[in-house]
């Protein structure tokens, strides 16, 4: 866990340098590395490094719009009933309430910039998920932080 609490207020000015996260906050979430890039009450951005074979199963953000800007690699995405792929330079738009998932089913790492608006409690959720290894606890904590996972088996091709 982290000693400093994330307090979301106005977006601070400044530069988040390459290779750094805002507040130097980096999370390990089930094999993914998430680095905070910006956090405010209105938005939350983080960079991901997703090794081959990792992914985030189908879920919904009922109160947040989410975007992904793919920096490297290819993501296989589930977007409201359809499977699609996104590669470097592509932007994926996922309005609040849209069931979605993403996986790295390629040979190398995938990297992306994710952001949500409003920020909600996603940064606090990542604090809870950091180094957690029990998928059932990940689902439980996520539900407490406004991320709802779909039941296993409800999306063909997701498992």
Image (cartoon, rainbow, N blue to C red):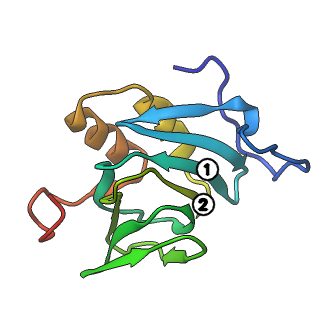
- What residue sits right under mark 2 in the picture? 115
Residue 157 shown left or right of residue 132 in the figure: left
Q: Secondary structure at mark 1?
A: strand
- Circle 1 residues within 10 Å: few <14, some 14–19, many ≥20: many
Viewer-nearest residue: 99 or 18: 18
Residue 28 circle label? none
Q: Is residue 121 visible?
A: no
User: Which residue corresponds to the image point at 21% horizontal and 60% vertical from the top-left?
Assistant: 150
Residue 35 horizontal/vertical position (percent) = 61, 41
Circles 1 and 2, Cβ within 8 Å, touching? The answer is: yes
Q: Is residue 20 left or right of residue 79?
A: right
Front residue of 34/3: it is 34
What residue is disc 1 on? 46
User: Within 10 Å of the Cα at label 2, are there few (<14), some (14-19), or many (20+) other Cα atoms?
Assistant: many
Which residue extends farthest left?
A: 153
**Drawn side of residue 37 relative to residue 70, left or right:** right
Q: Residue at the location (61% across, 74% down)? A: 89
Dividing the image into 4 quarters, which one contains the C terminus? bottom left
At horizontal 49% and vertical 72% (from top left) the residue drawn is 87
């Amino acid at each position: 866990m982290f000693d400093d609490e994330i307090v979301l207020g106005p977006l601070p000015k400044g530069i988040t340098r390459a290779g750094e996260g805002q507040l130097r906050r980096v999370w390990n979430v089930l094999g993914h590395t998430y680095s905070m890039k910006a956090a405010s009450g209105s938005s939350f951005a983080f960079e991901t490094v997703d090794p081959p074979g990792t992914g985030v199963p189908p879920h919904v953000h009922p109160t947040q719009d989410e975007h992904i800007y793919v920096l490297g690699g290819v993501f296989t995405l589930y977007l409201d009933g359809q499977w699609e792929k996104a590669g470097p330079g592509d932007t994926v738009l996922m309005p609040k309430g849209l069931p979605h998932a993403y996986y790295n089913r390629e040979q190398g790492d995938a990297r992306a910039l994710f952001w949500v608006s409003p920020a909600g409690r996603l940064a606090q959720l990542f604090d809870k998920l950091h180094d957690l290894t029990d998928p059932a606890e990940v689902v439980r904590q996520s539900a407490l932080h406004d991320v709802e996972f779909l039941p296993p088996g409800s999306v063909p091709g997701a498992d």
